[in-house]
Amino acid sequence: MTKQKTYKIALIGGDGTGPEVAREGVKVMKTAAAKFGFKLDFTDYDFGGTRYLKTGEILPDSAIEEVKKHHAIYLGAIGHPDVKPGILEVGILLKLRFALDQYINLRPVKLYPGVETPLKNKKSEDIDFVVVRENTGGIYTSIGGVVQKGTQNEIATQVMVYSRPVVDRCMRYAYELTRKRNSRKKMLTLVHKSNVLTYCGDLWVRAHKEMGDRDYPDIKQDYNHVDACTMWFVKQPEWYDVIVTENLFGDIITDLAAIIQGGLGIAAGGNINPEGVSMFEPMGGSAPKYTGKNVINPLAAICAGGMMLDTLGEEKAAKAIDKAVTDLLASGKIKSLAAGKMGYSTTEVGDLVASAV
Ligand code: IPM
Ligand code: MN
């Protein structure tokens, strides 16, 4: 018998309901692994608010070296009501993104059949696109400063920083993904604000055009200013196939995208280093008030697990998970994606998806 391929996964359940949703994701992924002939070996890490409050430690450098030895990271949620906002987000999420150079933030935006969208008259086939957000540069580089702090004349700067290589590697990923998706549109929309950001915007516009003209003649090039893009998300989401954008604009439009696909109960994302260790997570927070009640919706975490398997190269397993989620939602069994209103418990939803896989 040939030895089965084994993937080592660092599991950070995190805070609040994070561990509960992650558990269901692990359950579904393990079921898929058994079916498609590979193994998943999870190692638990307890980073998050609880550990920080107990030990004062957020994410030591030694932990980064440890997680680097894994094939991927699977994250539940980070955020604790007794920890000042920002500390854990910067100390865990952003630190991992930078340390592991996860330069792509991948956000599939799909309205599953049977899921309610706040957009009037939009159906499942109208909302199906992917946002490729640059994930380490721009304003998140955190170059800037403040002078005369606290005075009437205080000045603060936070600079949008982009180099051509950093734009190009993101653009390359987005073009390749557009080609691989091979949708009817085969179109890569650049979202920026080139009418005002005449340096950074222009850099992105040229990178988009030059790479597209040279290497991707089969892919249509499209451009939206970011402000207009927010209107089109609401009015005509069916326009989009793949979107590529810089970090902060991507942060903002992916939250809007999450709500049109049914909200945080279903939105999943990946922080990807195509040559390194990537991290997958549901977009929702730690939802402290639902902790331990077995009522939180695990579907976003399950979808994040599917994305992880896809990125690891287990495309069949990923497709099976996506199909199981699609069929379950289309069946109308799940009454709502909101916590406590699903008609099932967290573990039952995990079981339903796992058995469908
Ligand atoms: C996200 C989050 C993070 C970001 C925060 C928590 C630092 O909003 O993943 O979109 O701004 O990137
Ligand atoms: Mn965000």
Image: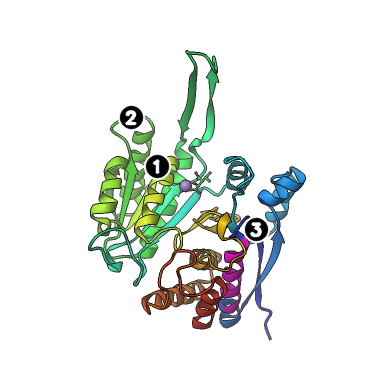
In the picture, the quarter occupied by the N terminus is: bottom right
Alpha-carbon span between mark 2 and mark 3: 40 Å
Name the residue beneath numbered marker 1: 249
At label 2, the amino acid type is Thr
Q: Earlier in the sequence, mark 1 or mark 2?
A: 2
Eye-nearest disc, 2 or 3: 3
At label 3, the amino acid type is Ile
Q: Is residue 271 left or right of residue 64?
A: left
Visible in this render: residue 222? Answer: yes
Name the residue beneath numbered marker 2: 198
User: Which quadrant holds residue 27?
Assistant: bottom right
Alpha-carbon span between mark 1 and mark 2: 15 Å
Name the residue beneath numbered marker 3: 12
Q: Horizontal and vertical percent for residue 36?
A: 56, 80
* Residue found at x 37% / y 54%: 257
The kind of secondary structure element at disc 2 is: loop
The kind of secondary structure element at disc 3 is: strand
The kind of secondary structure element at disc 1 is: helix
Q: Which mark is residue 135?
A: none
* Residue found at x 66% / y 78%: 4
Looking at the image, is 149 positioned above or below residue 167? above
Which segment is the magenta one?
Answer: 19-31
